[in-house]
Image: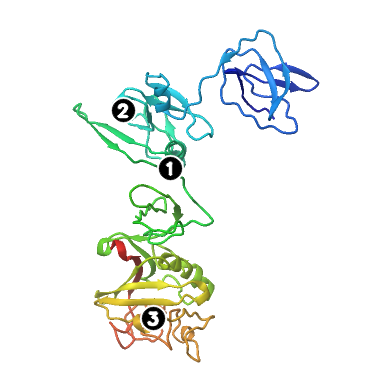
Amino acid sequence: MSKMFIFMLLLLCLTATIDEGQGSHCMADCTGYKHESSLYIRVCCIISNLGQTIRMREGRVKTIMVCPDVRPQACPPVLTDCKDWYNNGSTTSGLYNINPDGGTPFTVYCDMETDGGGWTVFQRRQDGSVDFYRNWTDYENGFGGLTGEFWLGLSKINHLTKEGSNTLRVDLGDFEGNTVYANYSTFSVVTIVEGEGSYCMADCTGYKHEPSLYIRTCYNSSNLGQTICMREGRVKTVIVCPNVYCDMETDIGGWTVFQRRQDGSVDFYRNWTDYENGFGDLTGEFWLGLSKIHRLTKEGSNTLRVDLGDFEGNTAYANYSTFNVNDGSTEYILTVGGYSGTAGDCMYYHNEYRFTTRDNNNDGWHRNCAQGFTGAWWYNKCLNSNLNGQYFNTATSDTQGVTWLCWKNNYATLKFSEMKTSCNNYM
């Protein structure tokens, strides 16, 4: 397999010998040679007027073969960014190759004139010639032309800003010829983290990342189905997670919705596995999953809000300033307290109880409350509330229905319920 490499000797850039078949010949740009037992050295510069070629192994020159008409040429320095080029004497704006972090070099546009010069340009809008309404892949990899309208790419911006102290400058102009600018002394864009060990939630009130948690923001994109979590001050970590519903309207917004009943379209009389993992449609009726609710509430101080509606159009709510669901080893013990609202405190009765389903009884009763009331809940021999009970499409009184007895007694069934959580510190 052909590979490119570099060997620097007395500031000369030489190219490598290529062996193919039984013979040997020279390649002007070092683009390939016969692979031996190991190859380590990679190319970092290509000089147009090459003549001499060499073949190398790591640590020492293994074989040297001189081809005719050699004219070695000095290698240019490997520079990290536009400021580096400027400090090395390049003062003309244009295209330059850079290598910010020792990875693969790439080409950027350098502004060598604005405010002392040395700016690496990563976005430009000027004439509408490039469509900027694009998908995630395009914004990650970049698009457009560096001398016109373009976006350099999130991955390259990360390479540019992940180390050291970086400055951001934004230059703006209107159609009357007026210009303004904004300077930021701190600027960094870090990589996307996906998979093992990292996750985010809809309102970003809890995620596994670092020992300390800061303010987080939730953005629910209807066409992407993604959530982005950020740390205070600057984007410290960006984690993309699919399929989370955020309520950004109720009581200043930022709520992670984890349960909704509204039309009976989803069967809630399910087993332990379903309640642990979640089910339903996040834009309709659903249960997010005990494991996710635990991850949402395991750190910091969290609030629970329960919104209720009956078949006459009346609504009520219950707020709890303390809310936590423990992990699976405890059968997801509920901790809830600090009630306020209009619906009445029906969760106090279920405080410090384990979750029960029809196939996993933890309710402290000699029978199974989930079976008797066709639901799944933090039952306590059995209930004051049963929001995962059987859904009835008309107002009725039924012990197996969706009920909140502190608001509607006599087991009057409800038309609507929605449970959501947020972080106390940022309410």
> Where residue 199 sits: x, y (%)?
47, 57
> The disc labelled 1 sits on which kind of residue?
Asn
Q: Pointer 1 and pointer 3: residues touching (CB < 8 Å)?
A: no
**Rendered position, 209 above or below 117:** below
Q: Nearer the viewer, mark 3 or mark 2?
A: 3
Badge 2 crowding class, 10 Å Cα cut-off, few under 14, some 14 to 19, many 20 or more, is few
Measured in 3D between alpha carbons, the distance from the residue under mark 1 to the one under mark 3, in whole angstroms, is 45 Å
> The disc labelled 2 sits on which kind of residue?
Asp
**Residue at image x 40%, y 21%?**
94
Quarter of the image that includes the N terminus: top right
Q: Nearer the viewer, mark 1 or mark 3?
A: 3
Disc 3 target residue: 351
Q: Earlier in the sequence, mark 2 or mark 1?
A: 2
Secondary structure at badge 1 equals loop
In the image, is 105 to the left or to the right of 129?
right
Measured in 3D between alpha carbons, the distance from the residue under mark 3 to the one under mark 2, in whole angstroms, is 61 Å
Disc 2 target residue: 127
Q: Earlier in the sequence, mark 3 or mark 2?
A: 2
**Residue at image x 49%, y 56%?**
198
> Where residue 13 sits: x, y (%)?
59, 18
Q: Earlier in the sequence, mark 1 or mark 3?
A: 1
Disc 1 target residue: 135
